[in-house]
Amino acid sequence: MTNHAEDFSLAAALRATEGWDALDDADLDAADDLDADLDEGAGAGPDDGFASGYADAPAAHEARSTELTTGDLDLVERHELRRVAGLRTELEDITEVEYRQLRLERVVLVGVWTDGTVADAENSMAELALLAETAGAEVLEAIYQRRQWPDPATYIGRGKVEAVREIVQATGADTVICDGELAPSQLRNLEDKVKVKVVDRTALILDIFAQHAKSREGKAQVELAQLTYMKQRLRGWGGNLSRQAGGRAAGGDGIGGRGPGETKIETDRRRINDRIAKLRRELKGMSGARDTKRQGRRRNEIPSVAIAGYTNAGKSSLLNRLTGSGVLVEDALFATLDPTTRRTETADGRIYTMSDTVGFVRHLPHQLVEAFRSTLEEVADADLIVHVVDGSHPDPEGQLTAVREVLADVGATEIPELVVINKTDIADPLVVDRLRRREPHSVAVSAHTGEGIAEALAAIEADLPRPRVEFTALVPYARGDLVDRIHKDGEITGMEHTADGTRISGRASEALASELAAYAV
């Protein structure tokens, strides 16, 4: 049944709708006249001469997008979602409804001071606060205790445990962060006493790495470190023994289970071990591409420079200044995890590579060093290490010591090192002078203003390894390719254009020198 008339025709109806979507010329002219009348009737006012920017908006947006570097795009993506504290609108007295909110974790910091000065303990707690804020927490209170060694049961003494519990109850904190790596028993005992979640410094750093990991290799490395840390800290259900499978075969897990006697915690540990083995196989395959590139640089004898240093010391900013690469720069701890390698050249035309590496920190978790070993090999295989230190930090000497401890773990102590004291624009000149006297082979720069960059480049070029083989050759003009390779890969000390060819003397690699042997004079 239909509501149309009996003589309804679809073809006739379609013909009747032709022209509905377009105005004829008369209607367009009338619309233009109406717009002109409205503009004249507006009279003189503050809006005279107004030009809409909507027409130019696409072009302007395209121009801005072309000016953005990859680092700027990464920073915009990272800041698209921000958690903000201090905008609480929750009522204090809610009795009849269940109210849930998503807010920052409110944490209390706890530390144990075993050696060093009071300033060292305060610097360590300040760094822990920065780590907590980077992870997305709101720091409420901090407390640290002087002890010869941490308490084996609760990390801090019995009295301090009660004090921390009172602070947690008074402030409404939901997490306690300890400045050290806690044993599983210490974590369990502290949680039982203070009645809130307890994490240690290692878990905090792993959480930051998980937030900032971007590449496939970086995510796999962070997951491997997290699983390695978690495997020894699995807990049963509540305070009782872990649940068992029950009467059914494999506890309902199907094929691959260990039968009714296997507990849930054993199943979790077995699955974690399987995942760790899989991640290690994947990382081994991913490192093949990095090894291939590294072998290519070795084969061509291209010098490599690795930028290492404490986190947030300005390594990425320095790389941008030295090479113009435009990588991500952010005033945050562990902002850059994935290594970035850029090709550049010296003032005399020699080609070399410069790599930015992951930042270091005091007590860097051993799991991270193992998981990021393939990345840290960029430092161990470099020909020169540019060690960046923050000159404005309260304890720059401590940064130098912490970084060199990690370099020793990866076998990079024998590599030549150039210390670059960064952030001189905001650093105390007396501190910079003190560092220059302690580190004779050093330069002072400001990656923000560009001060001292030319001196740093000259120092890097002076420390680069030079070709080993000396040569003097008369290269025919038909072999201009050899002259070009000498400019790129060798070092020229003299050049003269003669009637028979180009007479060149200098130093070159063994491979290039063997090709020049046919034209030796």
Image (spheres, rainbow, N blue to C red):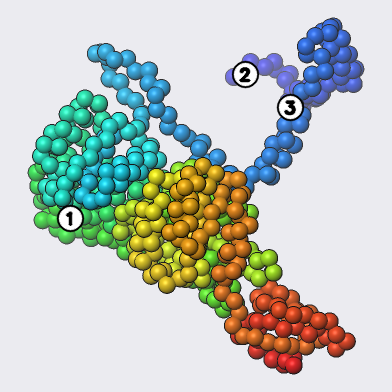
Which residue is tagged 1? 266
Q: Gap in Å between the C-alphas at discs 1 and 2?
A: 69 Å
Residue at disc 2, secondary structure = loop
In this rendering, is residue 42 above or below 496?
Answer: above
Q: Position of residue 200 (x, y in %)?
A: 26, 46
First in sequence, mark 3 or 1: give its number.
Answer: 3
Q: Nearer the viewer, mark 1 or mark 2?
A: 1
Q: Gap in Å between the C-alphas at discs 3 and 2?
A: 48 Å
Tell me, yes or no, if residue 188 can be seen here: no
Residue at disc 1, secondary structure = helix
The residue lying at 27 percent from left, 35 percent from top is: 142
The C terminus appears in which quarter of the rendering? bottom right
Which residue is tagged 3? 54
Q: Position of residue 209 (x, y in %)?
A: 39, 49
The N terminus appears in which quarter of the rendering? top right
**Amino acid on which disc 3 is placed:** Tyr
The residue lying at 26 percent from left, 41 percent from top is: 177
**Amino acid on which disc 2 is placed:** Thr
Which residue is tagged 2? 2
Q: Is residue 3 left or right of residue 91?
A: right
Q: Is residue 509 left or right of residue 482?
A: left
In-front residue for pair 491/28: 491
